[in-house]
Image (cartoon, rainbow, N blue to C red):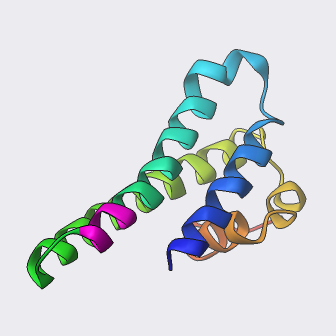
Amino acid sequence: MWQKAIQLSLDVYHATKRLPVDERYGLTGQMRRAVASVGATMAEGYASRGRRNRARFFALAKTSAEELRHYIILTHMLGLLSSSELAERPMLYRLWESNCPIEES
């Protein structure tokens, strides 16, 4: 599962390179922080002791993934990342597609 978080991180970093420069401290930074949090929190959970504590870390990682999903949907709705650009990054596309509230026209 941690390996998937790493791939998702790579997908986000590559995709956000395409965002406008004026989003560097906006969506780009927010997306990169959220995706970094997913993998880091999973690693912390793996290293923690106790089943309850581990579950707490994995729940936190999931909330960071949901935050990232929000930013992905927002960038798409703003026209900053197209469906085809998202499709070039499989993990990013899966996260977007799994709960996308809009239909492609």
Question: Is 49 above or below relative to 20?
Answer: below
Which residue is most to the bottom?
51
The percent coordinates of residue 37 (x first, y second) are 42, 50
Residue at 68% in and 50% down:
12
The percent coordinates of residue 38 (x first, y second) are 44, 58
Which residue is most to the top?
22
Which corner quadrant of the image does residue 63 belong to?
Answer: bottom left
The percent coordinates of residue 51 (x first, y second) are 14, 84
Please state which of residues 43 and 36 is positioned toward the viewer in this rendering.
43
Please state which of residues 51 and 95 is positioned toward the viewer in this rendering.
51
The residues colored magenta run 42-47
Residue at 87% in and 55% down:
85
Please state which of residues 16 and 99 is positioned toward the viewer in this rendering.
16
Residue at 77% in and 38% down:
80
Quick check: 61 left or right of 6? left
Question: Is 85 above or below relative to 102?
Answer: above
Indicate whether residue 76 is drawn in magenta. Answer: no
Indicate whether residue 46 is drawn in magenta. Answer: yes
Magenta stretch, main secondary structure, is helix
User: From this viewpoint, is residue 99 visible?
Assistant: no
The percent coordinates of residue 50 (x first, y second) are 10, 80
Residue at 67% in and 43% down:
75
User: From this viewpoint, is residue 5 visible?
Assistant: yes
